Image (spheres, rainbow, N blue to C red):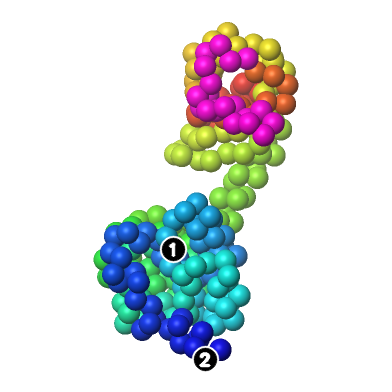
Amino acid sequence: MEEERAARQPAQYSPFRRAGRESEFVVIGLGRFGTAVATTLVENGRTVLAIDSDHDRVQALSGELPHVVQLDATNIDALRQAGVETFDTGLVCIGTDFENNLLATVLLRQLGVERVIAKALTITQREILLKVGADEVILPEHEAGRRLGRKMAIGHLVDYLEVSNDVGVVELLAPPSTWEHSLSELSLRQRYGLSVIAVRRGDDLIVSPSAGFRLKEEDIVVVLGRMADAERLRQ
């Protein structure tokens, strides 16, 4: 047990210091959100250093995350020993203590991490994090609420990812008016300003479907465009 614990101390965590830019993501804070981010990155073949101050949490995740270490992310020396400065992207996901979240964000910037993304709980926290150097700030609950609101407002909406103001990637059930019609016949770009980028049919995903592709009942159409235009198509 002592040997396992020693192996997780920052001073022993040397591979990333040698790897340089081959290392990609450092995730600080392994609550539900941070753990989901870290495990998803790992599942997609990305190199991740996951950090949390809680020993039990680190131990619990050691089977899922190949590189997980217990340390205080508000201590710049500990972060430096872990080789954090070699990473391209840092994600600060400390949700329960905004002061620690803020300090960890500042330290990643000081250490030279090229891109720093932080999690916030409120709009005010978001503004503060942006001012101290975060490149991007995510408000998971706020964004989840917006997505749910969009989904409730448009009955056929499956999912929605906002790209900019009211423009996003929209997944919606093919309306009855589109069934058995080809994309060229529907002229969605000309009539609605929507670009079809994929169609999900059962377990199959057809990316960039041809103009002759015919939509069927229960197809899920993935389009890029304005939410208002997607709602017009539904109607």
Q: Are marks 2 and 1 in contact (CB under 8 Å)?
A: no
As drawn, 6 above or below 125: below
Q: Quadrant of the N terminus?
A: bottom right
In percent of the image, x 57 and y 66: which residue is there?
A: 64
Q: CA distance from mark 2 to mark 1?
A: 24 Å
* Residue 201, magenta (yes or no): yes
- The residue lying at 41 percent from left, 77 percent from top is 73
Instruction: Tell me residue 41's x, y (percent).
Output: 49, 56
x and y percentages locating residue 138 in the rendered image? 48, 56
Q: Is residue 186 visible?
A: no
* Residue placed most toward the observer, 44 or 138: 44
Q: Is residue 85 magenta?
A: no
Residue occupied by mark 2? 2
Q: Residues within 10 Å of mark 2 (few under 14, many from 20)?
A: few
Q: Give the residues in magenta.
A: 196-214
Left or right, 33 with respect to 174, comes to left
Instruction: Choose top left, top right, bottom left or bottom right for residue 157.
Output: top right
- Which residue is the extreme one toward the top? 185
- In-front residue for pair 32/16: 16
Label 2: state its secondary structure. Answer: helix
Tag of residue 48 = 1
Image point (55%, 24%), residue name: 229
Q: Which mark is residue 207?
A: none
What amino acid does circle 1 point to? Answer: Val
